[in-house]
Image: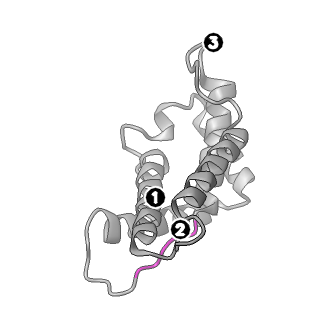
């Protein structure tokens, strides 16, 4: 059965890792992995990202704060909050996909990202199929 403590823990760990990695790119403007250190046209990228997300700068900052609250209150530290508010990751995913396409098409030097997937949507589908297979095998019928 897939509704076990193991699978709940795995799912939570994946969620937490997604939040931590996303915050490296978008959650800390002075962080060493922030998109601002990679992108050559900061204003153009930010305008394009917000357009892609269909969010205003204020709405995006509110989303960043929501993700950071989860990271800071439940992943990096366990604060006194009794209720966990798990953030929706659809915006985070759209940010990463936009960033990936931008880096691959506008920032990367020829051959500089050799071996990395150019099409993140296709790569995601492949990984999802692999995960579904592993999940199906591990939680197979009869358990």
Residue at 72 percent across and 40 percent down: it is: 122
Q: Earlier in the sequence, mark 1 or mark 2?
A: 1
Please tell me which of labels 3 and 1 falls first in the chain.
1
Instruction: Say which of 41 and 87 sits in front.
Output: 87
55 falls in the magenta region: no
Image-based side of 3 in relation to 91, left or right: left
**Residue at the extreme front:** 142
Q: Which residues are magenta?
A: 84-88
Query: Residue visible at 26% across and 76% down?
Result: 79
- Read off the residue under disc 2: 62
Mark linked to residue 14 = 1
- Marks 1/2 in contact by CB < 8 Å: the verdict is no
| Residue lying furthest bottom | 82
Name the residue beneath numbered marker 3: 110
Q: Label 1: state its secondary structure.
A: helix
Please determine whether, in this image, residue 137 is positioned above or below residue 66. Answer: above
């Amino acid at each position: 059965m897939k509704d076990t403590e193991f699978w709940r823990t795995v799912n939570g760990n994946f969620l937490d890792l997604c939040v931590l990695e996303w915050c490296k790119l978008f959650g800390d403007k002075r962080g060493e992995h922030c998109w601002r250190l990679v992108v050559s046209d900061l204003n153009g990228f930010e305008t394009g990202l917000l357009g892609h997300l269909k969010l205003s700068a204020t709405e995006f900052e509110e989303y960043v704060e929501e993700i950071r609250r989860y990271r800071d209150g439940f992943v990096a530290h366990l604060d006194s909050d009794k209720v966990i508010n798990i953030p929706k990751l659809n915006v985070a995913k759209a940010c990463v996909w936009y960033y990936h396409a931008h880096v691959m098409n506008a920032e990367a030097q020829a051959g500089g990202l050799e071996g990395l997937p150019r099409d993140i949507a296709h790569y995601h589908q492949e990984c999802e199929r692999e995960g579904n297979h592993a999940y199906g095998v591990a939680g197979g019928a009869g358990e």
